[in-house]
Image (cartoon, rainbow, N blue to C red):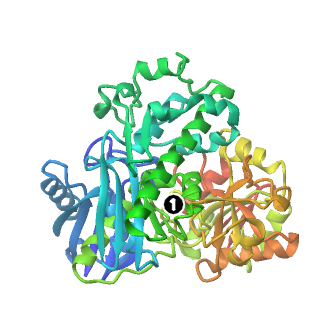
């Protein structure tokens, strides 16, 4: 049985359009629409191109699909809208099923975990009128223990801060997270956000957003237009200091606000965790929803005395709803769900297809016998090298298929990457990819971490050895790489270690600021020639600037 899960823009402000295809409960293809449209987040559209890819990959048509599943039970006339859309674009529409937004989040992470039972927290801005659910998963059942409705939202709280700091809501929250490390501890204490997002330790798990500081037309505020979520009273509470404009410098005040907001989010999340543990006595934790992209919060939850094991997928945000929705219907039909250990579910290109593109582009290239060894050698020479291999990752992180790689020991590399390759703010951190078995030597309390979903503290004696992916607070958003998951990438890092003694490369996504990650060889070439990368490996083909 084929089940197609989809998510996307039934309304103009819906984003993170994606599609995934299950066969008898097994994931076989998935992709995000933004990669095809070249528009980040693919707001306001349904995933036509991602659907087409899934069907083509499986060599089937829409007539072979048993169910199309969408997460969104509160949308008016949603079944008819989807039936009309799918029939118009694909000539036929299977039976449409609609599931709850937050239950799809929960299903995407619990049923793909290795846990027989687990606490589950889903948190985002909003979905089907809810913003947070506290659940318990046991065997084949997920029970909701507590839920919070909009506007009592961790996502709205963090988005308000994001906008105030001069960034875009539903887009740039990760910048606030990165900026928070630059705040001053003493300064941050001056901006306790309990007045905005209160929580009660005695009434475990309870929190509330003070709507006096929320714009009265908040429900009509859309991400594309970026109207403020917060009211003038919010600004007056912050000493009447106006919000930072996008092109303004970021002074110490705004850094302290970021630090205080981040710490407050962590406190509220820990309060929710304590309540959930009290109710379940579980020490396993599954996290999903857009707030689960906050890797610093995830670290605090992981380090809590209530947690022994943590699981996230590579797509905790709304781009993972298509997976969760499809899984829910697969479970209804009695299928077993595979554990989520592999993020590589998107398109791939053969060497013949790659060579055709390179030849037509009239660029100088070389076919290399051992591409991982050659690229490792170039990275060891402190070159910045693109890496385009195999099936595209699912989710917002580059995990070794669509990456830009560099030497983690070069103290000047962070500035080179930000200034000449990524064209982005200088405070933003980079991530390390590390051989799985070597990770504990460099990172404290390190566990299996294949999806860059949690930060870990860099061991004090290793900070100077890997300055590029070590953030100013001495944390790193690591990716552990195993031979079984991605053999070619593992070989590259191993070859780099043979030359340098360091089992780590710095890994950032193969794109530039405000652009989605590269989908195709054409995208990879465009990004290569429009940035300061020194070379790029596309399949077995190597291009190096200045050669010849």
At 75% from the left edge and 67% from the top edge, which residue is drawn? 504
Q: Quadrant of the N terminus?
A: bottom left
Q: Is residue 18 above or below residue 227?
A: below
Q: Position of residue 65 (x, y in %)?
A: 23, 75
Asked if residue 46 can be seen in this view, the reply is no
Q: Quadrant of residue 383?
A: bottom right
Q: Is residue 356 above or below residue 194?
A: below
Q: Is residue 356 left or right of 101 when viewed as pictured?
A: right
The foreground one among 275 and 365 is 275
The foreground one among 460 and 346 is 460
Q: Position of residue 258 (x, y in %)?
A: 59, 36
SS of the residue under disc 1: loop
Total numbered labels: 1
The residue that disc 1 covers is: 519
At 73% from the left edge and 53% from the top edge, which residue is drawn? 533
Q: Quadrant of the C terminus?
A: bottom right
């Amino acid at each position: 049985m084929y089940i197609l899960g989809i998510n996307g823009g039934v309304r103009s402000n819906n984003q993170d359009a994606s599609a995934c295809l299950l066969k008898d409960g097994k994931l076989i293809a998935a992709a995000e629409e933004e990669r095809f449209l070249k528009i980040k987040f693919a707001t306001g559209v349904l995933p036509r191109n991602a659907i087409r890819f899934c069907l083509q990959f499986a060599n089937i048509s829409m007539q072979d699909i048993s169910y199309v599943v969408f997460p969104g039970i509160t949308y008016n006339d949603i079944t008819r809208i989807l039936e009309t859309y799918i029939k118009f674009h694909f000539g036929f529409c299977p039976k449409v099923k609609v599931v709850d937004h937050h239950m799809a989040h929960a299903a995407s992470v619990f049923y793909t975990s290795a846990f027989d039972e687990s606490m589950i927290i889903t948190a985002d801005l909003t979905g089907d009128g809810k913003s947070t659910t506290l659940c318990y998963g046991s065997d084949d059942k997920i029970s909701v223990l507590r839920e919070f409705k909009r506007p009592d939202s961790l996502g709205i709280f963090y988005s308000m801060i994001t906008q105030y700091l001069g960034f875009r809501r539903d887009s740039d929250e990760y910048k606030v997270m990165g900026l928070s490390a630059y705040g001053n501890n003493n300064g941050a204490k001056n901006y306790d956000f309990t007045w905005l997002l209160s929580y009660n330790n005695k009434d475990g798990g309870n929190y509330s957003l003070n709507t006096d500081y929320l714009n009265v037309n908040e429900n009509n505020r859309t991400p594309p237009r970026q109207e403020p979520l917060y009211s003038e009273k919010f600004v007056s509470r912050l000493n009447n200091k106006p919000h930072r404009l996008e092109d303004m410098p970021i002074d110490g005040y705004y850094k302290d606000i970021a630090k205080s907001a981040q710490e407050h989010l962590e406190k509220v999340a820990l309060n929710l965790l304590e309540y959930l543990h009290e109710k379940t006595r579980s020490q396993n934790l599954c996290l999903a929803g857009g707030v689960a992209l906050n890797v610093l919060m995830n670290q605090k939850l992981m380090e809590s005395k209530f947690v022994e094991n943590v699981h996230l997928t590579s797509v905790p945000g709304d781009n993972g709803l298509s997976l969760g929705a499809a899984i829910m219907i697969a479970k209804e039909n009695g299928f077993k769900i595979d554990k989520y250990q592999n993020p590589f579910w998107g398109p791939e290109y053969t060497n013949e297809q790659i060579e055709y593109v390179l030849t037509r582009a009239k660029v100088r290239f070389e076919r290399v016998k051992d591409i991982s060894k050659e690229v490792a050698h170039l990275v060891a020479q402190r070159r910045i090298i693109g890496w385009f291999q195999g099936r595209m990752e699912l989710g917002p992180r580059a995990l070794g298929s669509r990456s830009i790689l560099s030497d983690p020991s070069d103290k000047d590399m962070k500035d080179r990457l930000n200034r000449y390759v990524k064209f982005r703010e200088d405070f933003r951190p980079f991530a390390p990819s590390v051989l799985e078995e070597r990770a504990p030597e460099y990172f404290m309390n390190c566990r299996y971490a294949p999806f860059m979903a949690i930060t870990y503290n860099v061991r004090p004696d290793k900070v100077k050895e890997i300055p590029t992916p070590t953030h100013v607070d001495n944390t790193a958003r690591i990716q552990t790489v195993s031979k079984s998951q991605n053999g070619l990438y593992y070989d590259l890092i191993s070859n780099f270690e043979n030359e340098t003694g360091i089992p780590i490369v710095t890994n950032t996504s193969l794109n530039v600021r405000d652009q989605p990650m590269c989908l195709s060889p054409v995208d990879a070439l465009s990004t290569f020639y429009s940035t300061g990368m020194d070379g790029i490996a596309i399949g077995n083909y190597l291009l190096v600037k200045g050669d010849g």
